Amino acid sequence: MRAHWPVVPAVLCLAFATDLRAAGFLEDSRANVDFRNLYFDRDFRQPGGNQTNGQSQAREWGQAIALTLQSGFTQGALGVGVDVIAMTGLNLDSSRDRAGSGMFPTERDGSSVAEFSRLGASVKLKYSETLVRSGVMAFRKPVLQSADSRLLPGLFKATTLESSELAGLTLQAARVTQVMGLDSSDWERLTSRYGGRSDEFTLYGADYALTEKSQVRAYYGKLDGIYQHTLVNYLGRLDFTADRHLSFDLRWAKAAEAEDFRNIDNRAFGALVGYREKNHTLSVGYQKMSGSDAYPYVTGTDPYLVNFVQILQFSNAGERSWQVRYDVDLAAWGVPGLSFMTRYVRGDQVQLSSGGDGREWERNSEFTYVIQGGSWKNASIKWRNATVRSSFGNDIDENRLIISYPLSLF
């Protein structure tokens, strides 16, 4: 087991210098254990297999256990708290010729490890409606998002600030110095899809509620020495009746180089509009990359895009993509907790390095069932299916079966 305690000295000093019996620190504490079982099966359909390593399949099965301890805050104007996370991922089935699912770290011979673990902590300070956290954590902001699509989520070593002192306005700031990927238990320097290595990512943002059902978000992020990223996002809803409404998600972003890194030019527009009537929702999305480069993001994190789906992002240089999606809640048919989603995304106008235009498409289907009561309440089973075809990348058929069980200890 590899343990990581970047903030333990600070945590212990603050904790023992404070009366832990003070109302709130213990009384408001919470402990949760999340169990996630994931079967992952990816089949590379093109001749020659995976373009990276020639494998015909990536098929593995694993079990994750994640313990989260969150304290309350001590009394006084400045409240002090501590959060601790402990995670482990167990390899239930794999082989050298089927490794590479992104679920586990790999050995030198390319096979997956039998298990991997993580341990971390963060200290948090609260004054009025302002919260500062420092240590190991996961968070999702428009210009930097922890990934969570395998057994264990990606993690950051970071310091964050969130302030809601003014009604309707939330200010955000963060400094991230290292990242731990989905299939890793080691801290790494920050890298990007453009190449380069960096020791710092900083972000600043503001979320402003225009009304109870509409919000504007503006963010700036900078991967030191590599790129800078500006993003504006509008989220809104227009109600017609109690069970009919339109939802809007509009995004615009611009990326450029930082300092003396090579020239970077990307502008991205995305829109997702959905119409919901009772238990049915039909959505249409459009996304367009402009400029000579692809959409920016830190390696091991998720890009904030309306057409970022199960496998593809549709974020290549020049790419244009459309999405059609349908969601239904099957409670109306007498099965509460059961839902279904299907979508199709098609991209073209990809500027290939070899010249010419590339094309790709992805189709997803997803069934989810959440147990509604009893001792297994909130446990869920999810089946995800995806098909990808590309004129320049891998052709993929994929299935994921995910069983999750969140358990509250106190």
Image (cartoon, rainbow, N blue to C red):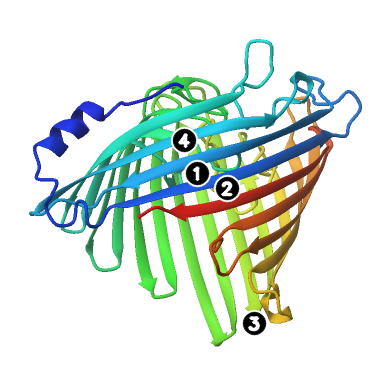
Residue pushed farthest right?
47
- What amino acid type is highlighted by mark number 4? Met
Label 2 – label 3 distance at C-alpha: 33 Å
> As rendered, which of 31 and 281 lies closer to the eye?
31
- What amino acid type is highlighted by mark number 3? Lys
Q: Earlier in the sequence, mark 1 or mark 2?
A: 1
Q: Between tags 4 and 3, which lies in front?
A: 4
Q: Earlier in the sequence, mark 3 or mark 1?
A: 1
**Quarter that holds the C terminus:** bottom left
- Name the residue located 42 percent from the left edge and 45 percent from the top edge: 139
Per the image, label 1 sits on a secondary structure element best described as: strand
Per the image, label 4 sits on a secondary structure element best described as: strand
The crowd level at tag 3 (other Cα within 10 Å; few <14, some 14-19, many 20+) is few
> As rendered, which of 51 and 113 lies closer to the eye?
113
Label 4 – label 2 distance at C-alpha: 36 Å
Q: Earlier in the sequence, mark 4 or mark 3?
A: 4
Per the image, label 2 sits on a secondary structure element best described as: strand
Label 1 – label 4 distance at C-alpha: 36 Å
Q: Which residue is labeled 4 in the image?
A: 87
Residue 177 placement (x, y as % from top left): 36, 28
Residue 136 placement (x, y as % from top left): 35, 34
Q: Between tags 1 and 4, which lies in front?
A: 4
CB within 8 Å, label 1 to label 2: yes
Residue 396 placement (x, y as % from top left): 81, 38
- Name the residue located 81 percent from the left edge and 30 percent from the top edge: 57
- What amino acid type is highlighted by mark number 2? Ala
